[in-house]
Amino acid sequence: MKIMLWILGILMSVCGVLLAATPLMTFWETNYFFIVLLIVYGFGAILRGISKKAFDSSFFFGILSLVAGLAILFVPGLKFMTSTTIIYMLAIWFLLQGAVALTMGLRGKKKGDETTKWLGNVVMAILCFILGVYSLFHPVALAFSVGMLIGIYFIVSGVNLVLLGFQIEKKAE
């Protein structure tokens, strides 16, 4: 078991270094994860509808998800459009998150919360607004940072697996 954890951890760390070294390519290829999610969800919803003989909105949304996943996979240009859409959705998400944090901060001030509590939300809102606006005008920077974060995640996960392998070894003794 410990050797398998070490091997998997080392492989994940090496993959993480490769992913972090090519962050834009990493981001563009994360579309395959989205495509797989659409296809698997589509198949699941269709099979559930057929097995329960319930051809409701979930069944038809499953068909739509399956068709969308296959279209993105096989139609040239849709993968690029999906990546671009995801980038802009993230930028808008940052702006919405900033609005929520600002609302929470202002409510906290109005309720009389501690200064550090409501002020933290206001600072977070400002940072989210800056990040959202910057991402809208510089989408490649957002794609670069997302790709880099994916690589870092793989490196950290790989190191954790190697360390877990060492912990299993110590507990066995």
Image (spheres, rainbow, N blue to C red):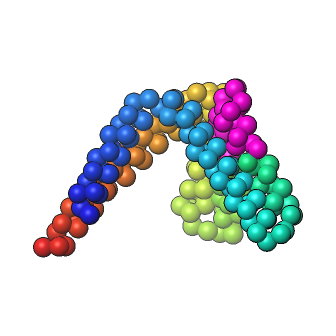
- Say above or below: 135 vs 37: above
Q: Residue at x 61, y 60 (%)?
A: 118
Residue 81 position in % (x across, y down): 70, 30
Specify whether residue 20 is in view.
yes
Is residue 81 found inside the magenta-colored segment of the image?
yes
**Residue 146 on image: x %, y %:** 52, 39
Q: Nearer the viewer, residue 149 or 133?
A: 149
Left or right relative to 85: residue 127: left
Q: Is residue 13 above or below residue 82?
A: below
Residue lying at 35% horizontally and 37% vertically, measured from the top left: 17
Image spot of residue 161 (x, y percent): 31, 56
Quadrant occupied by the C terminus: bottom left
Which secondary structure type mostly characterizes the magenta part of the structure?
A: helix
Q: Is residue 4 magenta?
A: no
> To which quarter of the image does residue 84 belong?
top right
Quarter occupied by residue 55? bottom right
Quadrant that contains the N terminus: bottom left
- Please state which of residues 123 and 26 is positioned toward the viewer in this rendering: 26
Q: Is residue 9 above or below residue 25?
A: below
Residue sitting at the far left: 173
Seen at 69% across and 26% down, the residue is 76
Q: Residue at x 86, y 60 (%)?
A: 57
Q: Does 162 sit above or below residue 139?
A: below
Horizontal placement of 122 versus 17: left or right? right
Q: Is residue 133 visible?
A: no
Q: Which residues are magenta?
A: 67-93
